[in-house]
Every structure is written in structure tokens, then in C-alpha cells.
Image: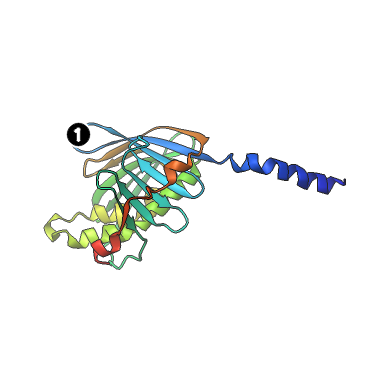
Amino acid sequence: MNKLIKGVVWLMLLWPVLGLAENMTELDYLDQDPGTAAYPTRILVNTKFMRMDSGKDTGDFILMDRHSGAIYNVIQSEKNIYRYNPHKVKLAKPTPWKIQEEVKQLPGDTRKFTLGVNGKPCMEITATQKLLPDVVSALATYRQALTWVESLTWQRTPPEMRDQCDLVQHVFEIRRTLQYGLPIQELYVNGRSRRYVSNSVRASQPALFQLPSTYKIINADQIQGN
């Protein structure tokens, strides 16, 4: 048996083991809303999906198909799954639309930067460049997929209650929020915050990336009126 054939046979023998070796990355944050206690947010990412939840395997969760950008919001108490398909944003930027950005280099590959629009500060983010780039990619896909939902929310908000910082964060400047890598500290003008806690890599659990087969899937396009 020549070396090439031996190599092929060796790979074939290893294939079942390699097939079981897919890992997932877990990223843990503490989120906080104004006037409330901080609460955990868990993000799980493998090659095909991203899942966001509170850290409980059996609770409500959001699942995103990383390839199609489709997002599923699973509500356990309703036994419903709300599906959001990505669409092109039809909303035009307000006029004027002038972004202000200041960046401070911190030790290593970490930067602290602020973003604002038309003279109003919107957010301060500390991010690190080399930590979990695949998770950053998944987060970018997720935020991009929801821009059309956020733009519709903006249009339905009474003009006197609108905040252009919402358009910065959720619609027009989402790439900027991830431009320096994984956020490890996020502070927003509306009082919301997020703080990095930890990350780990472990064997992927397929059940965590599956939708409940008996739940009703509701197309959110119809609800949103897209």
C-alpha cells in the first residue's frame, strides 16, 4: 500500500471522530437596563448557528442561521417561534447626518471609542481586536439582519420620542460598533450597559441549536407589515 492510499485510509478511519469534534464558543455578558439589576446574557456560536439566551438551556432563546441570516425568537410560554427574515432597509438617513467618533488606544489590542451623531453622544464602547473574531462575525450578521425591524420601529415611533442614537446603534452605523473587535464594555446614552464576563470553548451541543418541532412558526414579516 503506497503512502497516498495509507493516508486516505487513515483519514477515513478518523472521520467519525473528527465529525464529532465540532466545538462551540460560549461568550458571557452581564447586561443592565436603567433602574434594574444586572442579568446574564449567554451567546453560543458554532459554524452554522448563533444562540442567545439567559444561560438556561430550557428557557426562551434567539437562534440565528449564520448563512441565511434568518432569526428565530423562541417563546416557551407561548409555544411560538417568531421568524425574522433579513430585508433591505428602506429608511433614508436623516438630514443632517454627521457622525462623531473619538478613539483612545489602550494597552494591547484594546480601544475605547465613542460614537455620536449631530453633536449628541450616543455610546462608549471598549473593544479588543483579537478576541473571538468568529463571534464578532456572527454578531455583525445578527445586527445587520435586524436593521429592517429597527428601521420600522423608528418609523412607527412618534417624532417627539425619536432618538437618532437608536439609528446609529441599530440601523445605519452597526458596523462601527464592531469595528475594533469584540465589545468588552458597552455604555449607551439610554442607560443600558453590557460588560464582558468570560468566554470558553467546549463541545457543541446540537440540541441547543434546534427549534422545538411542535411549536408554531409565525412569520414576523406579516406582523411587521413588510
Residue 168 pos. (x, y %): 29, 54
Residue 220 pos. (x, y %): 29, 59
Residue named by callout 1:
36
**Residue with the most extreme front position:** 214
At x 44%, y 59%, the residue is 68
For the N terminus, the image quarter is top right
Q: Is residue 69 above or below residue 106?
A: below
Q: Quadrant of residue 56?
A: top left
Q: Is residue 196 left or right of residue 223?
A: right
Residue 101 pos. (x, y %): 34, 50
State the residue in front, 207 or 72: 207
Q: Is residue 102 left or right of residue 9?
A: left
Residue 34 pos. (x, y %): 19, 38
Determine if residue 198 is in view.
Answer: yes
State the residue in front, 132 or 104: 132
Q: Is residue 64 left or right of residue 6?
A: left
For the C terminus, the image quarter is bottom left
At x 42%, y 37%, the residue is 27
Q: Is residue 60 left or right of residue 134?
A: left
State the residue in front, 117 or 141: 141
Determine if residue 179 is in view.
Answer: no
Label 1 CA crowd tier, 10 Å (few <14, some 14–19, many 20+): few
The way the protein has been coloured in the rendering is rainbow
Dot 1: element? loop
Q: How many marks?
A: 1
Label 1 amino acid? Thr
State the residue in front, 214 or 4: 214
